[in-house]
Image (spheres, helix red, strand yellow):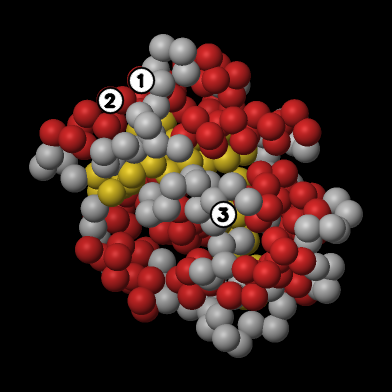
């Protein structure tokens, strides 16, 4: 059965959508069947794999409102073994419409159960907030992948995210683990990048992926063409790094689940994130 992984960081601009699209495509190239759930109302994962947000018939919004099943909402991308449940701006209204709904935090989890066995991986692109959409993503997932930008205040807000994960584990999803921490937008010409990488490795220990995603103009260009980087420019450093990450995910998938979130919670007393 497929593994459901939420790509999440409440801080914006960390590379969540870029990672969701390009890691998914890289795994699909490795002959894994992959489904993307676009749970960010901006819908950038949807357009990033070539789906027109204005033409979708069923979306994540319809799933959360029980207007469609997950299977009905799946759109086939033009890329082999890569599907998506898309979204558009309508998703912004979901949090308000679900305020009084029963089981509002587990709508996505229940919807994904019937299709889980059809995929090797299901990635949920979460919005840059800790609202109901993100709660649904975390409740539905087995683990969370956290992209962190190699910039000043990189760990800003991570304490709150870890607290949210703990709350989700206590109330909705006791088995939620941290899949891994991915360093993104690295610029090795600066000392700051090295300092941030060391700081994050000191805080998250062996949960940090060895693969580091550099700043790369091709990664920035690819979404405007509706293509993952592997299909836009396979020779670029961005494509090579996401291919490397996919291999790391496949090789270390079970090992990375060995570190419990409670260990990270204990790090706060000695390695507090920047505020």
Going 84% across and 68% down the picture, which residue do you hit?
66
Image position, residue 102 (x, y; %): 88, 54
- Labelled pair 2, 3 in contact (Cβ < 8 Å): no
Q: CA distance from mark 2 to mark 3?
A: 26 Å
Image height of 140 relative to 71, above or below: above
Q: CA distance from mark 2 to mark 1?
A: 6 Å
Q: Is residue 28 left or right of residue 213?
A: right
Image height of 187 relative to 227, above or below: above
The disc, 1 or 3, on the residue closer to the chain's N-terminal end is 3
Residue under numbered circle 1: 202
Under circle 1, the secondary element is helix
Residue under numbered circle 2: 198
Going 62% across and 34% down the picture, which residue do you hit?
165
Image position, residue 8 (x, y; %): 53, 47
Residue under numbered circle 3: 126
- Labelled pair 2, 1 in contact (Cβ < 8 Å): yes
User: Toward the viewer: 238 or 164?
Assistant: 164
Under circle 3, the secondary element is loop
Going 31% across and 25% down the picture, which residue do you hit?
199
Image position, residue 183 (x, y; %): 35, 40
Q: CA distance from mark 1 to mark 3?
A: 26 Å
Residue 247 in sight from this viewpoint: no
The disc, 2 or 3, on the residue closer to the chain's N-terminal end is 3
Q: Is residue 210 left or right of residue 74?
A: left
């Amino acid at each position: 059965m497929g593994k459901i992984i939420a790509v999440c960081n409440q801080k914006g601009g960390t590379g969540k959508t870029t990672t969701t699209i390009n890691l998914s495509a890289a795994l699909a190239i490795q002959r894994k069947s992959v489904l993307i759930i676009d749970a960010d109302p901006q819908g950038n994962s949807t357009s990033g794999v070539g789906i027109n947000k204005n033409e979708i018939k069923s979306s994540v919004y319809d799933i959360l409102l029980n207007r469609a099943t997950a299977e009905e909402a799946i759109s086939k991308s033009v890329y082999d073994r890569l599907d998506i449940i898309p979204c558009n701006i309508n998703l912004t209204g979901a949090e308000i419409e679900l305020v009084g709904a029963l089981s509002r935090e587990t709508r996505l989890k229940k919807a994904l159960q019937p299709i889980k066995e059809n995929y090797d991986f299901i990635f949920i692109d979460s919005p840059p907030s800790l609202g109901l959409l993100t709660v649904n993503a975390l409740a539905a997932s087995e683990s969370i992948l956290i992209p962190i930008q190699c910039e000043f205040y990189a760990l800003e807000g991570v304490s709150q995210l870890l607290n949210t994960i703990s709350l989700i584990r206590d109330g909705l999803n006791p088995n939620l683990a941290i899949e891994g921490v991915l360093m993104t937008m690295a610029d090795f010409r600066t000392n700051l990048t090295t300092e941030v990488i060391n700081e994050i490795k000191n805080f998250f220990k062996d949960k940090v992926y060895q693969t580091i995603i550099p700043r790369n103009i091709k990664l920035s260009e690819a979404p405007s063409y509706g293509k993952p980087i592997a299909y836009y420019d396979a020779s670029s450093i961005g494509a090579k790094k996401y291919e490397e990450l996919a291999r790391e995910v496949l090789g270390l998938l079970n090992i990375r689940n060995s570190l419990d979130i409670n260990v990270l919670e204990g790090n706060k007393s000695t390695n507090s994130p920047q505020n």
